[in-house]
Amino acid sequence: MGGTDGSGADASTASYGQAVVYKEKLPRRWTIATTVVLAVWVAYQASVLLPEDGTVWFVILGFSMLLGLVFNAVPISKRIYNRIKVQGGQLTVGRETIPVESLTDDSLREAREQPTDAEFVASLASRSREELAELRRRSGATRPPRIMGGGWSVPMGMDEIVVQTAQGESLLIATHHREALVDALMRARQAPRV
């Protein structure tokens, strides 16, 4: 099960009596690829320009660092706001931590059944104009869920689940591994506290 780390055992096979540990690893391919390409480019320019044109090389180095930041803004944002960890009965998303016990069982069961973005778009495409107008009217009357961990929206390439706390607050969690996260949350909710 990609994206999970267990302590001594796979997180999906840990017994209910053990502490549930789930840590979602974010993909690093894009960051590694852009860093390698820019490093090779800077090294090539250094071999051509140095030592005579050091100033030009420093300009190229600065521009390459800026490009690296621009190309990796989304992965950096994901690392800040969308790191997910379930450990010791706590759910941590980005810089926010809440107790797993504060999530309702019903919302966790519903999260398992929520459609993916592709399924949701397909269901909207099959609706009539009247049905879409009614959906728009009803959605305008309800408050959208708060994105847990911060950030403006769900980053590209990530799925989402909506869960509810015992206090009635709806939380949207961006994830790469929906099934694994919901499974870990349900197991953490059922595991006895030590």
Image (cartoon, grey):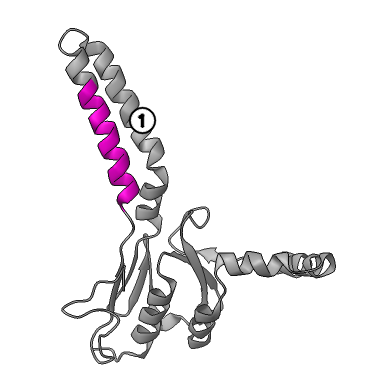
80 lies above or below 52: below
Asked whether residue 127 is drawn in magenta, I would say: no
The quadrant of the rendering that contains the N terminus is bottom left
Residue pointed to by mark 1: 66
The crowding category of the residue bearing disc 1, from other C-alpha atoms within 10 Å (few below 14, some 14 to 19, many at least 20), is few
Asked whether residue 33 is drawn in magenta, I would say: yes
Residue at left offset 49%, top offset 54%: 156
140 lies above or below 29: below
Residue 20 placement (x, y as % from top left): 28, 81
- Mark 1: secondary structure: helix
Residue at left offset 40%, top offset 69%: 177
Q: Is residue 143 visible?
A: no
14 lies above or below 139: below
Amino acid type at mark 1: Leu
Residue span colored magenta = 28-44
Q: Is residue 46 left or right of residue 81?
A: left
Residue 94 placement (x, y as % from top left): 37, 60
Q: Is residue 53 visible?
A: yes
Residue at left offset 36%, top offset 48%: 76
Question: Which residue is nearer to you in this view: 11 or 188?
Answer: 11
